Image (spheres, rainbow, N blue to C red):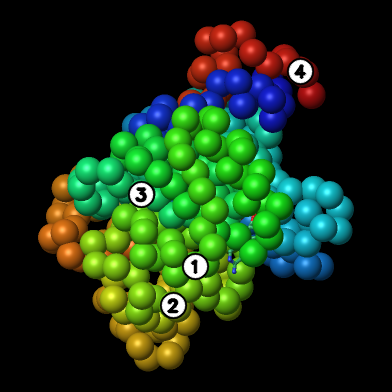
Amino acid sequence: MLLLTGNDVIKVLDMADCMEVVEKAFAELASGTAVMPLRISIYPLDGLALYMPAYLKEMGALACKVVTSYKNNPVKHNLPTIMGKLLLQDPETGDVICIMDGAYLTAVRTGAVSGVATKYLARHNKGQKAGIFGAGVQAKTQLWAMAVARDLAKAYVYDIVDEAVTKFIKEMSIKLNLEVVKADSPVQILEEADIICTATSSPTPIFDGTKVREGTHLNSVGSHTPNARELDTAIIKRAKIIADSYEACLNEAGDIMTPIREGAIAKSHMYAELGEIIIGKKPPRADDKEITLFKSNGLAIQDVATAKLVYDKAVQAKIGTEIEL
Ligand SMILES: NC(=O)c1ccc[n+]([C@@H]2O[C@H](COP(=O)([O-])OP(=O)(O)OC[C@H]3O[C@@H](n4cnc5c(N)ncnc54)[C@H](O)[C@@H]3O)[C@@H](O)[C@H]2O)c1
């Protein structure tokens, strides 16, 4: 069995490759060749533990991720909010062939699905600007994916913690060779950005949805529990909503579930699943005025596709440690 550390995964995992396999995974989901039960959630102490299995038949990928989200980890234990490990299996025998660290993988696959959504849904105007809410781990891969999906002219970042913004700008402007600046307020992002990603740990809405400009595309990555939400009812009502999965949105996404509970929208307000757009079952945006919003809860198919990619690349590059249990 191959053991891949976080550093091993970093060495082989690239955003553009990840976007390619994640797009294929969503196409499999929409075409009926993916098996993905709703993940199991457990709330131990002040955290959330998720158990996420899936099988992608066409890709020959079978895996399960154990991932946790402990919002107090950075302050309380000097550990990241999100931590995870993956077990990759051989679909022929069922045996576990690889254990790999899942923290970086999770961040990259979460960026990747926003990248794929942006590729299909954002406008194609020149000199596009990205606006990122949150300057944490997921926020970085969101911007990375935006830069793969579109030729960005500039990016804005807003976080309630100044130090996080400073670190984000330093790291991402060099990594992407892009002008990345601090937004002084949430409104500045709404006024400037063509593509917005929300990747915060906030349990309550982070901006006024009535102020989002026509034509904006949003990727909402943060809250994915029934009672937390980053987005207010106004933006959910105004936008064409594309879900990663209807089932996940109706069971896990406070951003969608709260407006439904309030009676502000019906379930049918969700227009499509991302996979349906990818396989051409439903057209993407209707015109340049429409606001499109991709709600990401994080699906096991993203992890499974990415884990298979990482494993194949690691074997090819002879990276990792063989162990016997
Ligand atoms: N959809 C998915 O697939 C997926 C995957 C992983 C994580 N997540 C979620 O993404 C969120 C971010 O995760 P992370 O790993 O980046 O956490 P993180 O702790 O590294 O970063 C979160 C950042 O959000 C900032 N923040 C909090 N409230 C804010 C506000 N009102 N405005 C602006 N910034 C604010 C914090 O200061 C922090 O810098 C979490 O809610 C996590 O559960 C989603």
- Which percent across, then down, holds residue 30? 28, 49
Circles 1 and 3: CB atoms closer than 8 Å = no
As measured in the structure, the alpha-carbon distance from the residue carrying label 4 to the one carrying label 1 is 49 Å
Q: Nearer the viewer, residue 306 or 195?
A: 195
Amino acid at dot 2? Asp
As measured in the structure, the alpha-carbon distance from the residue carrying label 3 to the one carrying label 4 is 46 Å
Residue placed under numbered mark 2 in the picture: 208
Q: Please, is residue 18 above or below residue 42 in the view? A: above
Q: Nearer the viewer, residue 234 or 244?
A: 234
- Which percent across, then down, holds residue 131? 44, 54
SS for dot 2: loop
Circles 1 and 2: CB atoms closer than 8 Å = yes
As measured in the structure, the alpha-carbon distance from the residue carrying label 1 to the one carrying label 2 is 9 Å
Quarter the C terminus occupies: top right
Of label 3 and label 2, which has the lower sequence position?
3
Residue placed under numbered mark 3 in the picture: 129
Circles 3 and 2: CB atoms closer than 8 Å = no
Tag in front: 3 or 2: 3
Establish whether ligand 1 lies closer than 8 Å to the Cβ of label 1: yes
Residue placed under numbered mark 4 in the picture: 323
Q: Residue at x 61, y 69 (%)?
A: 202
Q: Nearer the viewer, residue 159 or 27?
A: 159
The numbered mark at residue 186 is 1
